[in-house]
Image (cartoon, rainbow, N blue to C red):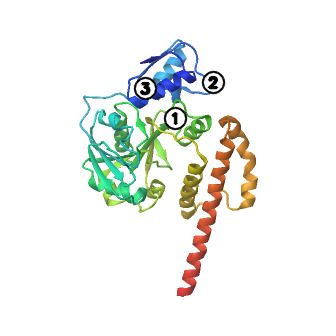
Amino acid sequence: MNITGLGPRERREIEEALRRGEPLGLQLDGELPRELRAEQVAPWFDAASARSPSLQDALRSYLPPAARPEAPPIRVSAVIPTNRGTPLGLAALRAQDVQMEVVVLQNGRCSGIVDGDRVYALDWRGHGATRQRGVELAKGDYILFTVDDALPRGRGVVRCLVEALEAGGYDAVYGRQVPWPTSDAVTRDRLAAWTPSGREPHLSQRLDHVFALARRDTLLNHPLPDAPIAEDLLWRQGRRVGYVPGAVVIHAHPRRPGELYRRTRDIHAQHIMLGEAPLVPDAAALIAALPGVVGPALRGGPGEAVNQLAELLGQLRAAQLTASAARGQGRGRGRSS
């Protein structure tokens, strides 16, 4: 399927084709829309050309990594928990130029038939313990952690992670997330800040199991923590992690207030328990943060102000919960002394 423009209608068609697993080519007649950048657009396509030579060069420099059939064999196990069904990226993972097995961990809330190379029905024990069980069940030399609604791009993308891991001497590496063609402006901005574009792998203070890879031996010797969420944040403490911007996965969630509140609350609680200062420690801080809602609300359109407020309330609730837990621990120590 060849695309010549990037208007709203074309973006919907691109997203539908990506979800169906169709190959896509871009033959851009004009310029990019103002709200899009070459590094966000190019990973949607397998080939790209543009009337502008400079734009064509930029687009081609960000295309997904191609397969290298002559490269040495590598054994990788993808570990994917799911409560929705067959992982979106299953076909893309099976098409990789490495020896890939896809281990799908199906929890009890998932109905219907789930496809994968090996599918296990497991009780959900949180992100940490469930993924670690997948490590134990896997057979590959490397473990690729990803999620059931992510779409890896390029037949060489997993090899790209493996080669960066070994070349950099890292304990783990993770790739870049780009938004779906129909994602909103706030999501595009957030992902560009969280996993920025770049040319070369480099040391990072982050780790994200949306698309991350480590040696299986490393994970067996240093298991993921038994954490309900943010197990990647906890595991990376004191470890050498690399960021590989050339290894791209399409992944973004629709922004809904309830989900944003719960996820923000749970993740920020983990950050605070690691000793980081809460971003919204009290009601006064919440009020002081409200002017910052205006810019994203204007960019995100109707409903984004509510999303922003949900995230602030999630941060406040995380601070309250961790403070309450700390007080309870203090009283417990006092009684035992």
Q: Give the class, few, some or many, for how many residues have Cα within 10 Å of label 3's Cα (few <14, many ≥20).
A: some
Amino acid, disc 1 = Pro
Query: Of the residues shown, which amino acid type is indicated by label 2?
Result: Arg
State the CA–CA distance, disc 3 to disc 2: 23 Å
Lower sequence index among marks 3 and 2? 3
Residue 56: image location, x then y, percent: 50, 17
148 above or below 325?
above
Q: Would residue 206 be found to the left or right of residue 80 on screen?
A: right
Left or right: 115 in relation to 209: left
Mark 3 vs mark 1: in front: 3
Where's residue 310, x and y in %? 64, 51
Measure how far apart labels 1 and 2 are at the Cα level. 16 Å
Amino acid found under the numbered disc labelled 3: Ala
Q: Where is residue 37 shown, x and y percent of the image?
A: 57, 27
Asked if residue 103 lies left or right of residue 209, the reply is: left
Q: Is residue 63 visible?
A: no
Disc 3 to disc 1, C-alpha distance: 15 Å
Q: Quadrant of the N terminus?
A: top left
Q: Which residue is denoted by mark 1 in the rendering?
A: 179
Residue 140's disc number: none
- State left or right for residue 10 relative to residue 74: right
Q: Secondary structure at mark 3?
A: helix
**Which residue is identified by label 2?**
34
The residue depicted at 53 percent of the width and 38 percent of the height is 196
Which residue carries the number 3 mark? 17
Q: Are marks 3 and 2 in contact (CB under 8 Å)?
A: no
Q: For the C terminus, give its image quadrant.
A: bottom right
**Is the residue under label 2 in contact with that under label 1 (CB below 8 Å)?**
no
Rendered location of residue 273, percent (x, y): 55, 64
Q: Relative to 295, is 111 above or below? A: below
